[in-house]
Amino acid sequence: MARALNTIPLSELQQDASAALKRVQKSRGPVVVTRGGKAAAVLLSLDAYKKGEQEREILRLLALGEKEFDLDDVLAEADELLSKK
């Protein structure tokens, strides 16, 4: 079962950005900012953002690897990216 989204109204973010940042860091996941009751943006901790970027880069390399590159080279680059954690 999917977990419930952690949300924060835009007005709360505007009133106390510091508390909102603490909430993002504590949640270890995305915090959805709502405006008028509808999702408007997503806040992520820096660690979560970096991890997502690394995962997207690995997927990009793997996708390219299937078409243009030697799979061993692509996997070596993926290992290098993962070791930078």
Image: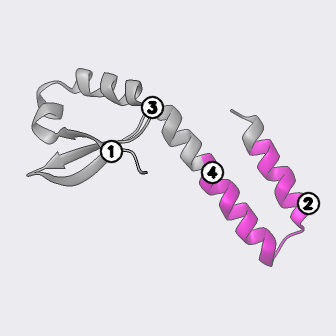
Residue drawn 55% across and 40% down?
Answer: 50
Q: Amino acid at mark 1?
A: Ala
User: Which of pointers 1 and 3 indicates the residue nearer the eye?
Assistant: 1
Q: Which residue is mark 2?
A: 72
Q: Which residue is mark 3?
A: 28
Element at badge 3?
loop
Q: In screen coordinates, is 8 left or right of 15? A: right
* Image location (x, y in percent) of residue 20: 25, 28
* Image location (x, y in percent) of residue 13: 18, 33
Instruction: Looking at the image, tell me whether mark 2 or mark 3 is earlier in sequence order.
Output: 3
Q: Which residue is mark 4?
A: 55
Element at badge 1?
loop
Q: Amino acid at mark 2?
A: Asp
Element at badge 4?
helix
Q: Is residue 71 above or below residue 56?
A: below
Residue drawn 72% across and 35% down?
Answer: 84
Residues under labels 3 and 4: Cα distance? 16 Å
Q: Amino acid at mark 3?
A: Arg
